[in-house]
Amino acid sequence: PPKLAGYERAVFLFDGHDAAQVEAARTHWKTMKDAGHAVTYWQQTSDRRWERKA
């Protein structure tokens, strides 16, 4: 992704059933966290609702 300076919020969506996308998302997560951004992870449930994960 581009640099996030100047943005209030960024959202990264990925297919949790695609191993390559999951690995890329983990890399983005670590990069954003190491840069000091507040990060959260949400997962879609079987009934299509979004649930925040710890």
Image (cartoon, rainbow, N blue to C red):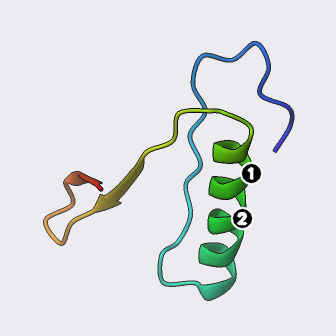
Q: Nearer the viewer, residue 18 or 30?
A: 30
In the rendered image, the residue lying farthest to the right is 2
Please say if 25 is above or below 36: below
Where is residue 3 drawn, in percent x and y? Answer: 85, 31
Q: What residue type is labelled 1?
A: Thr
Specify the amino acid type for callout 2: Thr
Residue at 63 percent of width and 67 percent of height: 26
Taking the spot 48% from the left edge, 75% from the top edge, the residue there is 16
Q: In this view, does 6 lie to the left or right of 54?
A: right
User: What residue sits right under mark 2 in the picture?
Assistant: 27
Judge whether 41 appears above or below 16 on screen: above
Q: Give residue 35's position: percent from left, percent from top.
A: 74, 38
| Nearer to us in this view, 54 or 5 | 54
Residue identifier under label 1:
31
Q: How far apart are marks 1 and 2 (CA)?
A: 6 Å
Cβ–Cβ under 8 Å for marks 1 and 2? yes
Mark 2 lies on a secondary structure that is helix
Residue 5 falls in which quadrant of the image?
Answer: top right
Residue placed most toward the observer, 38 or 7: 38
Secondary element at tag 1: helix
Measuring 66% from the left and 77% from the top, which residue is drawn there? 23
- Point out residue 49 in the picture as x, y percentages from the top left corner: 19, 54
Viewport quadrant of the C terminus: bottom left
47 to 40, vertically: above or below: below
Which residue: 63% across, 64% down? 25
